[in-house]
Image: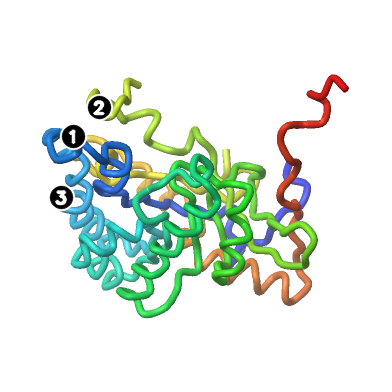
Amino acid sequence: MIANPIPWPDGARCAVAMTWDMDADSAFNWYNQETADNLVAAQSWTRYDPLIAIPRLAEQFARRDLRLTFFVPGWVIEKYPAQIDLLLKNGHEIALHGYLHERSNEIAKEDELYWFGRGLDAYKKHLGAGPRGWRAPSFAFSKYSLRYLLDAGIEYDSSLMGDDIPYALREADSNRSLLEFPTDWTLDDFPHYAHNRDLGYRMPAWEFGALWISVWHPALSGRLARFRAVLELLDYMQAKGGVWFARLDQVCDHVQKLMAEGRWTPRSETLPIYESPLPEFSKD
């Protein structure tokens, strides 16, 4: 069913990247800039992420010899450096996830570039070099985002939802591109688990050889009963076999190697796909 199947390492049937968005209280502060200090219960809910869930995740993944990708806003790197160091010590990848979890396609392009730069600076200051990967907060990838990512030397994005396997995002009117590692809304725990009145929330890869990228949030799926279900899912996958568990930078290395050797060529999309409003809306 996949038209352009990708060969995974060691004959694996599929690749699994269980990614985690370590937002902590970044988005909480972005969306409640004047009132965050008085929303104490909601603040505690978001801080469960770095203070309780991250040490739990690090310990359990170490027991299973798993190294994963964590997308982290720059502000969170600044505020919770010990948790970042714990993840790095256990071999996990830290990728960038904005600065204060700002939604890039809801702000001016100059503001998007400003906050993106703040995030990069925070990342480089703590980790010593720039990130290889990026996920737009809330998947809010704007029509300017690709240019900013390419200018910064980002090698892969995991914000879009246009395929079951990696594909290339190419900048219009240039030869520059990066790899897209797509996910899907249904693979994100937030719509299923997030319920917080203060914040306004009331609310088949193995068979076909795909890349399964799930999106988890420590403040949600790091809680006891839910994390037990996560571990049961991981144990099931490991027992089934034929699964390559990988960080996204490892997937990036593998895909780039296949491309360099001429063994696989990704489907390519050029951005922006079109400009709004569509000319079809015109009555002239």
Residue located 39% across and 63% down the image: 118
Tag 1 or tag 3, which sits nearer the N-term? 1
- At horizontal 36% and vertical 80% (from top left) the residue drawn is 128
Q: Secondary structure at mark 2?
A: loop
Q: Percent x, y for residue 3?
A: 78, 47
Give the image location of residue 65, x and y in percent. Answer: 33, 64
Q: CA distance from mark 2 to mark 3?
A: 19 Å
Q: Position of residue 111 (x, y in %)?
A: 47, 52
Q: Are marks 2 and 1 in contact (CB under 8 Å)?
A: yes
Residue picked out by circle 1 = 42
Marks 3/1: CA–CA distance: 15 Å
Q: Residue furthest front?
A: 284
Q: Nearer the viewer, residue 110 or 262?
A: 110
State the separation of the CA atoms marked 2 and 1: 7 Å
Q: Which residue is mark 3?
A: 52
Position of the C terminus, as image quadrant, is top right
**Residue type at tag 2:** Asn
Q: Residue at x 21, y 53 (%)?
A: 50
- Numbered badge on residue 196: 2
Which of the two discs, 2 and 3, sits closer to the camera?
A: 2
Q: Please determine whether, in this image, residue 43 is positioned above or below residue 202.
A: below
> Is 178 on the left or on the right of 172, as rendered?
left
Can residue 231 be seen in this snapshot?
Answer: no
Left or right of 111 on screen, residue 270: right
Q: Are marks 3 and 1 in contact (CB under 8 Å)?
A: no
